Image (cartoon, rainbow, N blue to C red):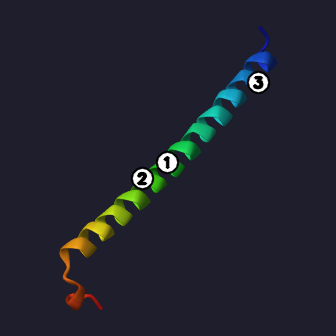
Amino acid sequence: MSFNELWVHVTDIILAAKLVSALATGAWAVVRLVQQVRQRKASDRTTPKADRP
């Protein structure tokens, strides 16, 4: 296996790692958003309607 063939695999691995990282970041952002929405809904249920702005 020549250096050039090896280098192609290295760049493939780096691209794959970047893709996985981007997907993980996106998934984390979605999870955080869902948690915030759930918290808001929960706080809405505990707050009497008269006290809401």
Q: Which mark is residue 8?
A: 3
Q: Answer with the quarter of the image where residue 36 lies.
A: bottom left
Q: Residue at x 62, y 40 (%)?
A: 19
Q: Which mark is residue 9?
A: none
Q: Residue at x 49, y 48 (%)?
A: 27
Is the residue under label 1 in contact with that under label 2 (CB below 8 Å)?
A: yes
Q: Which secondary structure lies at badge 3?
A: helix
Question: Would you say 30 lies left or right of 8 here?
Answer: left
Q: Which secondary structure lies at badge 1?
A: helix
Q: Residue at x 79, y 11 (%)?
A: 2
Residue position marked by numbered label 2 in the rendering = 31
**Which quarter of the figure is the C terminus placed in?**
bottom left
Q: Which mark is residue 27?
A: 1
Question: Would you say 16 lies left or right of 38 here?
Answer: right
Q: CA distance from mark 2 to mark 3?
A: 35 Å
From the top left corner, tell me how far across and down residue 28 is, in percent.
Answer: 45, 50
Q: Earlier in the sequence, mark 3 or mark 1?
A: 3
Q: Answer with the quarter of the image where residue 37 lies.
A: bottom left
Q: Amino acid at mark 1?
A: Ala
Q: Amino acid at mark 3?
A: Val
Question: Would you say 28 lies left or right of 51 here?
Answer: right
**Which quarter of the figure is the N terminus placed in?**
top right
Labels in figure, total: 3
From the top left corner, tell me how far across and down residue 30 is, in percent.
Answer: 47, 54
